[in-house]
Amino acid sequence: MSEPAFIEKWEAYFKKARDEEFVKNQKATKTRAIGLIVLLTILGTLIGVIRSPEESFNKNIAKQNIFSKDNFGENWPFKVDSFELKCMKAQNGLWKYVANVDGKSYSLNSTAKFNSDYPYPDEILDTNGLNNLRKLEASKSNWREFEPFEGPLNINDMNYTIGNSSLGKAMDDICGD
């Protein structure tokens, strides 16, 4: 065992085994790194695909800004020419309608006012326009009578005033029923 040839033979054997193990570990590390990159790429793609429709929908709404005087003409009950509508579910399950105008938020119904404490739309609401719209909606019904709008909107005022109007239908399309 003390002969130099025997020692060299075993040292070469162990060196070869260490080198092979090192190469094997390097390959395993590279394989793991590539696998991790592939996994992260797949996850990123899935997250992007899952989020894209909603984000692009919201971006399209912002770009199109369907809530504008140009789209509703005489039946536009607001002093502002347009607003961006945001809909949120309150804890009680009712919709909170919030209009964003020039960086300010206005509650369009009592649910939003109660839950969000945004100001009511008094500053942006055209009472005459709202009453004209309410009168129009009452005339389409055989059981409703026109009652002039006074004071803050509640959820029933929203439904009664804009319910079946084109504005109400557009809001339902965005927010849901």
Image (tube, helix red, strand yellow):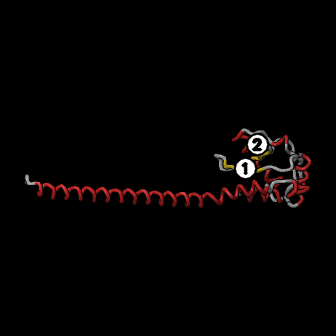
- Which numbered disc covers residue 105? 2
* In the displayed structure image, the side of residue 46 where residue 85 appears, left or right: right
Q: Is mark 2 on a helix, strand or loop?
A: strand
Which amino acid, by three-letter code, is at mark 1?
Lys
- Can residue 145 be seen at all in this image of the molecule? no
Identify the residue shown where x is 78% and y is 59%: 169
Badge 2: how crowded within 10 Å, few (<14), some, or many (20+)? Answer: many
Q: Quadrant of the C terminus?
A: bottom right
Check the image and name the residue furthest to the front.
Answer: 4
- Can residue 51 be seen at all in this image of the molecule? yes
Badge 1: how crowded within 10 Å, few (<14), some, or many (20+)? Answer: some
Which amino acid, by three-letter code, is at mark 2?
Ser
Tell me the quarter of the picture where residue 120 sits.
top right
Identify the residue shown where x is 8% and y is 54%: 3
- Residue 98 at what x, y percent from top left? 75, 46
Q: In which quarter of the image is the N terminus?
A: bottom left
Identify the residue shown where x is 77% and y is 50%: 84
Seen from the viewer's position, the closer of residues 127 and 62 is: 62
Residue under pointer 1: 86
Label 1 close to label 2 by CB (< 8 Å): yes
